[in-house]
Amino acid sequence: MTEEKKLPVDTPKEWMRFATENLQVAKHEMEHETPAYHTICFLCRESAEKFLKAYLISKGWELKKTHDIIELLEYCSTYEAEFDLLVEDGSILNNVIANSRYPGDIAFEVIGLRQANETIEKAERIKAFVLHKI
């Protein structure tokens, strides 16, 4: 009998690879003379989402279409309650993007260096937490 080969989307390794790349690009963008803060925040939120999905998939979770960090953390906490410690971080990542995804959502200037640094910090924390758990 042949073992069914998993698609890349079904493997935690692929999710972590994309998550790592998102975070790496966000941090690299911070080195520019005029960083694209909105994009940095977006990439950090994307990175956190992908790290959480990597964890969930490693536990046998069937991939669901959601971009809500809090919802993903709730799924994670069904496997390990300690994921509840990341709710504040997840909320910050959700809010910065929910409020700034499209032109006109908030003034472009509202998202700056402080928010970019904060989202990098939150994404790094989620990354470290997931890597410790996998």
Image (cartoon, rainbow, N blue to C red):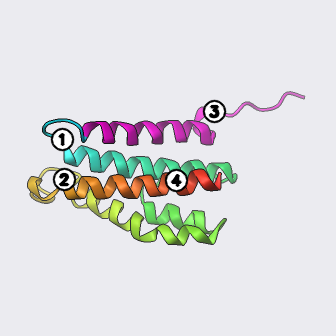
| Residues shaded magenta | 1-29
Kind of residue at disc 2: Leu
Helix, strand or loop for disc 1: loop
Q: Residues within 10 Å of mark 4 (few under 14, many from 20)?
A: few
Residue highlighted by disc 4: 128
Q: Return the x and y of residue 110 as percentages of the image width and height.
A: 12, 59
Q: Residues within 10 Å of mark 2 (few under 14, many from 20)?
A: some
Q: Closer to the camera: disc 3 or disc 4?
A: 4
Q: Closer to the camera: disc 3 or disc 1?
A: 1
Residue drawn at x 42%, y 47% as measured from the top left = 47
Kind of residue at disc 4: Ala
Q: Main secondary structure of the magenta part?
A: helix
Query: Is residue 23 in the magenta section?
Result: yes
Q: Return the x and y of residue 27 as percentages of the image width and height.
A: 32, 41
Residue drawn at x 37%, y 67% as measured from the top left = 91
Residue highlighted by disc 3: 7
Residue highlighted by disc 1: 35
**How much space separates mark 3 and mark 4, taking CA atoms?**
25 Å
Mark nearer the N terminus (3 vs 1): 3
Mark nearer the N terminus (2 vs 3): 3
Q: Is residue 64 in view?
A: no
Helix, strand or loop for disc 2: helix
Helix, strand or loop for disc 3: loop
Q: Farthest residue toward the right?
A: 1
Residue drawn at x 26%, y 37% as measured from the top left = 29
Mark nearer the N terminus (1 vs 4): 1
**How much space separates mark 3 and mark 1, taking CA atoms?**
35 Å
Helix, strand or loop for disc 4: helix
> Which of the 4 image quadrants contains residue 6?
top right
Query: Is residue 27 in the magenta section?
Result: yes
Mark nearer the N terminus (2 vs 4): 2
